Amino acid sequence: MFDETIAAIATPLGQGGLAIIRISGDKALAIADSLFAPGGKSKTQLAKAKSHTLHYGHIVRDERRLDEVMVSVMKAPATFTREDIVEISCHGGIRSTKAVLDAVLDGGARLALPGEFTKRAFLHGRIDLTQAEAVADLIHARTDLALSAANEQLAGKLSHRINQLRDDLMHVLSHVEAHIDFPDEDIEPDTINGLISKLENAGGFIDELLATANEGQLIRRGIRVAIIGRPNAGKSSLLNQLLGRDRAIVSAVAGTTRDTISEEAQIRGISVVFVDTAGLQEAADAIEREGIRRSRESLGQADIVLHVLDSSEPLTPDDETYLAEFTERPRILVLNKSDLPNQLGQAEANDSITVSVSCLENNGIEELKDAIRNRIWDGKITSEMLEVMINSRHQEALRRAADSLQTTLEQLRADTPLDLVAVDLRIGTNAVGEIVGRTTTEDLLDSIFSTFCIGK
């Protein structure tokens, strides 16, 4: 893998002011030199230039100038991949960018695979696996909280905790295996108690990490919120208020929305995709039936349901049907039109939060935003939590580790033969090592880095 020099466009493809072609590998400088014509009076060859310097000139192919460029030279090992890296900043047109990339590929580089630059950084020991994942999280962060969590992970805060946990488990494992190698020497009760204490502490820390899993995944991926209710209850008006702009058509005519409308907003630091449904009433025509089908599909994917009721009118049979139908879903009852006399009374549904709003006067919207966040979790996200927020891969590995440690503790307390104890303890230690990449398989690495964009 490291014998090949790779290249890719590192910026989004499309029309823009600038684009960057990144080259990494042993031949990066030679390939760039074969294409680069220094500008002005400079005659400097890129291979002989000082590291971390910037050079003006042109990319030339077959004696034809392709583009006016600035070229960054970064020499190993002080680079992202710990290989020689050249970055060519050219104009951001689709044709000009592709022309420069094609010239680089014809010069001896091959097109990088998704995430291959970051994979090389990991394989060269520049970053560990959690930091590699943080690079992707940083790129895809949609809220300030997601950005903060990614930066903490990239800085190695989670890696430090995981490595300390693995070291503690390795310490216990080495004691157990030492006594396996010397079976004539009985392990002292105090030593056994000390090992049990270390494993209990490790199990407690794993539980603390697992407690951040839901918050971590919510911050990274956000949530989906479906807005339901009978026609003309104010669903579209509510969507517009939550977004802070007019996105859905609002009309006094019932049934204006005949398709689902999805829009994203930041609510209390969480990325929320709101889905305004077309209603769930009996369909009058084929178009309405399709809208209702899509509404049902959106409901199945939603993390929270906002059930909008018109508080200026008594409950209708449709309202009562919806109240009974969605009892198993996390739900917030939104009593709209609170600026008018209340004819609804107190609507109730099991395990539902009730919030009164007036979309006309923009009252109660901030309280509703708080309710949405609190419906997902209570409490405040602290900087300490952001440092160790785990993702679904970490969660799965830690659960396996926790199960193995629990079995190990039971075996030690029951005076089970140490060779059996070592098997489960080694499984748990390896599971923890997977998180930072100390114990990995090629399939695991391919799975992680295939989700990256090309050029990163």
Image: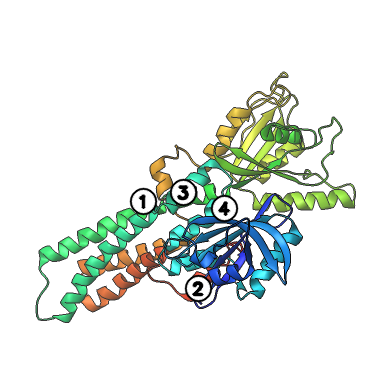
The numbered mark, 1 or 3, whose residue comes first in the sequence reads 3
Q: CA distance from mark 1 to mark 3?
A: 20 Å
Answer with the quarter of the image where residue 310 lies: top right
Name the residue that disc number 3 marks: 151
Earlier residue among tags 1 and 4: 4
Residue designated by label 4: 139
Amino acid type, mark 1: Glu
Query: Which residue position is annotated with label 1?
Result: 208
Closer mark to the observer between disc 1 and disc 3: 3
| Above or below, 130 relative to 109 | above
Q: Position of residue 34 (x, y in %)?
A: 61, 71
Q: Is residue 233 left or right of residue 354?
A: right
What's the amino acid at mark 2?
Asp
In front of the other: 272 or 352: 272
Mark 2, secondary structure of its residue: loop
Q: CA distance from mark 4 to mark 2?
A: 27 Å
